[in-house]
Amino acid sequence: MARVCLIWVDRHGLEGLDPAMVATAAGLPLDPGGAIPSAVVTAPEWAAPPSVRSRLTGKPVQWLDLAGEIGGGSEAKRLARAAMAVARAAGRAAKGTLPQVYTPQPAQTVLVAGAGLAALSAAREAGLLGHPVILVTPYKDAAQAGADEDAETVSLLAAQLPAQVEVLPQTEVAFLSGAAGEFTVELRGPQGSQTKRFGAVVLAPDGVYAQPESGLDLNWAEPLEALQPDGMAGKDGQWLQAAVIAGADAPATADTFARAVQTALALQARDFVQTTLIFSEARVATPGGERLYREARQAGVIAARVNPGGLEVAQGGKLLKWREPLLGDDLELKPDILAVAGPVSAAMPEFLSNQVLWPGWQWLVPESPRFSGGRTARSGLYIIGALRGTAPGADRRVQAAAAATDLHDRLTQGRAVPVPSVRHTLCASCLTCVRVCAHGVPHYGTESIECAPAACVACGMCAAECPAEAIAPPGWSNPELTAGLEAGLAKAGSPKLVLFACAQSGAQAFAELCRQGYEWPEGLLLYPLPCAGRVGMQLIMKALSAGADGVMVAGCHDGNCRSVSGNLRARLRVGEVAQTLAQLGLGPERVSFLHLASNQPRRLAQAVDQFVSSLG
Amino acid sequence: MISLNKCDPSFKYEVAAEPGGAGIKACFSCAACSARCPVAGHREQYDPRRIIRMTLLGQREEVLSSPLIWLCSACYSCQEVCPQQVRFTEVLNAIKNLASKAGYAPPSAKQISGLLANHGRLLAVTEFENDKRAALGLPPVQERGSDYTAILGITPEAKPAGEDA
């Protein structure tokens, strides 16, 4: 019992309890600080501070929601209940053992590329969270503000950057590959180009006023900001026709669209003025944007959606023509007043486009709440600020802070997911990876295999199936895994058993068993893999030749695989290895496959016990 | 080619001002109504969203003179599915009212309103109904509508001609 100690994390519901008294009553020492073999913590894992979590990584720990266990009542009763719960948890913690777990370490440095409020805020927040930050800006110094931003605020922010932030002026991102924890970025600056490794990348280019629709006479058409609706009025029977163009050639940003709707509303409020709002996409994803758009329709503004580039501008804007998609008819309007949203925009970096998967943008930044706070479909890549259409001011700062918090969580809590890369010297362009990848990541480019950046979930099926070991998500290649295997097996007891566990099912069931205080066999080496599909014949054979007595693969149930066929491929490969072992006379029972769900820890325990006893 | 300059911007406000027409401007053209409409399944030309759009653009004559607006069977399916609470069945009643005022009501509509005004009902009353009423202890209904005019308190001037005969 003495080796388990109590770590007290103060939470709501634990008021009035003295940690020392609870510890004494439960018969445990309080946290002495420093390295401890195992512990009971008075908070669930998610609620514990990062310092506590990092100290206890790889230790048998009981995360106890103590507040929920003790309830209310008199002081003495609560103390008794707390002591009982802690003592019970300590019993489980003392019984538990943890086998060696292989975890690749993500890079911690953060790259912020861009300028202005969003870039500086993101660099600042990430720096304050303890990450080394490199801020690359195309300008001479970091104080350059975007076209729609307050220059003074930005320069003040630039002057107050924390010490962890290194600024690389006149530098641009030339190429980027990878995902959270493992980005490889090529930076091009005055000193030539250099390649660096980053844990997360934040893209925050500054906004510029884009060219309005071609053919517009800008002497006549007014920018939104300059238009003064006061005093404009038509007459009964002779209405004044106003038009507001909010991104007809290409969709306006949400912020620009909101301003255009506001202008349209102000115009419509005048007497006998009919306003037509012309846009190619109604971007209402701003706070209150949806409401504002509805308000405009209620006020009588005609909303006219045109196909991108479908607005025909004649006579400098005095005649507008477009196809009305609902009526299937052509519409024309000769506006008396014309306002144009000079859209603030930032160019999408070229290296991000992928001709195979997405021609534009929507695949990377889907309009879903899951991708708020600067997140993109690609783990570890954040796009914030003007490029995202975020309004200048507080909105950009909040978004930058949200991105920094999210990347911090991702890099410190093992949620980093890398993207495969191809070693071209070994690649024979056999297209096996193209065939097996369920996410469309590898594709044949002009001369060789290329990998689509955002699509990869690092299931590693490509690495398992590649006959030349030429492709793998960084950190998950055969040599890297084998190195970990050899080191781990050298330390493991006997019989030596390697458990390859899918992160979606096997590894979660394993973690649940550890929480319950399960006693693992001494020779067990756990390898959490992003998907069971990562296990190929090569890896199983390498584990056996490195000294493992048995190899077990725990993957998801049929039809549950996030990568469609990872579990089935793993099962197939295990069967093939068993056949080969039988032919060699080495015993087919040394490999086994287990279908599992994350909520079946007992099933995993039984299977492991059975497997170990069958190995003798 | 439709010219917005020739359209009537006040038309949508007129429809909105009629009883039942208030919701029309909220429409954002999602076509939930058109997809649900059972009439649209039989007559391709009948499209609730299209009627709303034409109204919002201000195509007064085209909408009011269209025979399509009289096809609605008032099943209220559109009203149920509308995410913006446009209440299209009621909006269409408002449009039909405006069309009647403008003299576009089809002959059948006039006949129906004549039946209602003269008899208080759309179908003839036979002995069958009156036997049923007698069994329930209700007074018999007469062919002529004098009883309902009395209940509603319709003044003789407002009565359609020939009623008293």
Image (cartoon, grey):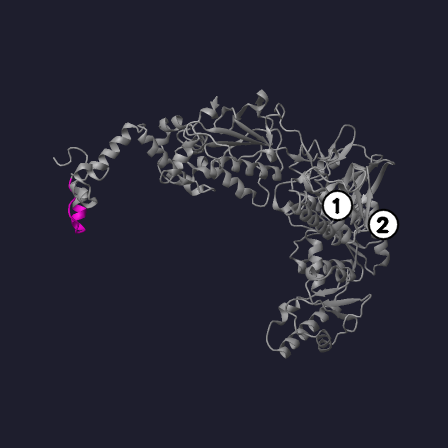
> Of residues A517 and A151, which is closer to you in this image?
A151
Q: Which numbered disc covers residue A519?
A: none
**Label 1, on which residue?**
A120
Please state which amino acid type lies under the numbered disc 1: Leu
> Mark 1 falls on what kind of element?
helix
> Of residues A252 and A465, which is closer to you in this image?
A252
Disc 1 chain ID: A
Q: Residue at x 80, y 66 (%)?
A: A37
Residue sitting farthest toward the bottom = A76
Residue A296 visible to an observer of this rendering: yes
> Of residues A534 and A422, which is closer to you in this image?
A422
Q: Residue at x 73, y 51 (%)?
A: A410
> Mark 2 falls on what kind of element?
helix
Q: Position of residue A43 (x, y in %)?
A: 69, 65
> Of residues B24 and B34, which is closer to you in this image?
B24
**Residues tagged by mark 2 and mark 1 found on one chain of the structure:** yes
Is residue B136 one of those drawn in magenta?
A: yes
Q: Is residue A13 left or right of residue A540?
A: left
Residue A592 visible to an observer of this rendering: no
Q: Are marks 2 and 1 in contact (CB under 8 Å)?
A: no
Q: Position of residue A420 (x, y in %)?
A: 77, 41
Q: Quadrant of the C terminus of chain A?
A: bottom right
Q: Residues within 10 Å of mark 2 (few under 14, many from 20)?
A: few
**Label 2, on which residue?**
A483
| Part of the protein shown in magenta | B131-142
Residue sitting farthest toward the front = A231
Question: Eyeballing the image, is A343 above or below A404?
Answer: above
How far is mark 2 from mark 1, CA to CA? 40 Å
